[in-house]
Amino acid sequence: MKSGLLLIAATFIVAFSAPLMAGPMEDAKAAYDRGDYQTSVQILRPLAEKGDATAQFRLGVMYERGLGQPQDYATALKWYRAAADQGNAKAQTNLGFLFERGMGVAQDYDEALKWYRSAAERGNAVAQRNLGVMHDLGQGVAQDFAAALTWYQAAVVQGDDVAQNNLGAMYAAGKGLSRDDREAARLYRLSAEQGYYVGQYNLGVMYRNGRGVPKDDVEAAKWLRLAADQGDAFAQSDLGQMYEGGLGVQKDDTEAVKWYSMAAEQGYPIGQHNLSIMYLDGRGVARDYREAVRWSRAAGEQGLAQAQNNLGIMYLNGLGLTRDFAEAFKWFKLAAEQGEVNGQNNLANMYSKGVGVARDHAAAARWLVKAAEAGDALSMYQLGDMYAGGYGVPRDDVRALMWLELAGAKGNEAARNRRDILAKHMPPDQVADAKRLASKWLEAHSN
């Protein structure tokens, strides 16, 4: 399973979040609450035109969200600015958000920072959190974890759920402070218990990996499901993995396919890759190579190396599409260049056999070295064979025996047999040298 992606986010403020005095503003809220947005707008407009900052802010929200009239970011920005100029912190926050995202106006981080800072200094928690995000990511300002912490902490004191998550992410990553998984988990829990889906996802990841809390797959599945039910693609894909592996839930490939499909349809590449595997194997769904190709391609085109390798395999074997060695080579190379060891091994085999590319033993050896150095047993075995035969590399029995020894230590039975045969024909001092080199390699790669 993948490690959790600890996410941060900036957001805007919705209208009618505070109690109102009797009068037109209360009437506007009542219309809003019953979904009569046109009436709400009709009540708010004259108040806004007379300079009422609260009405201006709320009218801006209606335009931003397209409630009661067509969505119009430029008009929303106009009303937010009118209210912001009067010191309305909520309007300043939303105005900053429009500038940050370039909605209704050219993107302008300086303006976003200006308005967020003004609202944050007035105590607005959402502005404090958003200002923290900009310092955290270095948007419009030099990346400054200390400043991000200050603003996140200010928002956390007010109970802001997103700030709780974001501060937890800083503790989990050790950004601007010492890494503290227990504090990260505590903050994620505060966020998750308020219903924030990213906090729920991150808490699930902490339980799944046993970071800051005891490892508990049942708790992990519980929090991942809550986030998945809110439509989070990361959580949906991870929950699918829990069902596929029977971790914290009853093993159920059909449920796994369901959750992978939800994530895949949202364009999440890991969900797409996992769904492709299910179609390829016929687990939880009827085997369908065309669907496997479809989802591997979708993930591969987004740069997911495992999917690129799998798509190469399907082109190599003509599964769900016309066999095409050149295409197989292309996808293996894309995967290999990202460090995907299976892709590196497959690419090496194509060079070695001259399939989809001119035969080139030296190139094959280069890719096998990369995969072997990453710990791939099959590549270690094949590289040992190349050194023993002098294919693409100078013949070197000591180096050959070293790689065969390492592959055998990883459980490759063919490598063990080849090692034993080769060792019988080598002087004892060379065998000792090979074993010494293997031990040195293991020591260097023990972490």
Image: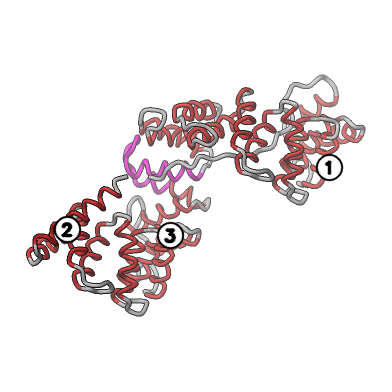
- Furthest-front residue in view? 429
User: Residue at point 64% right, 39% down?
Assistant: 135
Query: In what quadrant of the picture does the C terminus appear?
Result: top left
* Residue found 55% across the figure and 30% down from its top: 195
Q: Which residue ends up furthest to the left in the rendered image?
A: 424
- Pinpoint residue 81: horizontal percent, then vertical percent: 83, 39
**Label 1: few (<14), some (14–19) or many (≥20) C-alpha neighbours in 10 Å:** some
The label nearer to you, 3 versus 2, is 2
Q: Residue 179, image x and y in percent?
A: 47, 32
Q: Dot 1 lies on which element?
A: helix
| Nearest to N terminus: mark 1 or mark 2 | 1
Along the line of sight, which residue is nearer the eye, 180 or 93?
Answer: 180
Q: Amino acid at mark 1?
A: Lys
Mark 2 highlights which residue?
A: 433
Q: CA distance from mark 3 to mark 1?
A: 47 Å
Asked if the magenta segment contains residue 214, the reply would be no
Magenta residue check for 250: yes
Q: Amino acid at mark 2?
A: Asp
Numbered disc 2: secondary structure: helix
Left or right of 308 in this view: 360: left
Asked if 151 appears above or below 437 in the picture, the reply is: above
Measured from the top left, where is residue 420 in percent x and y?
A: 10, 61
Q: Nearer the viewer, residue 20 or 33?
A: 20
Residue numbers of the magenta segment? 233-258
Q: Is residue 396 left or right of residue 131?
A: left
Q: Is residue 292 above or below residue 329?
A: above
Q: Does the CB distance between marks 3 and 2 fall below 8 Å?
A: no
Q: Which residue is mark 1?
A: 78
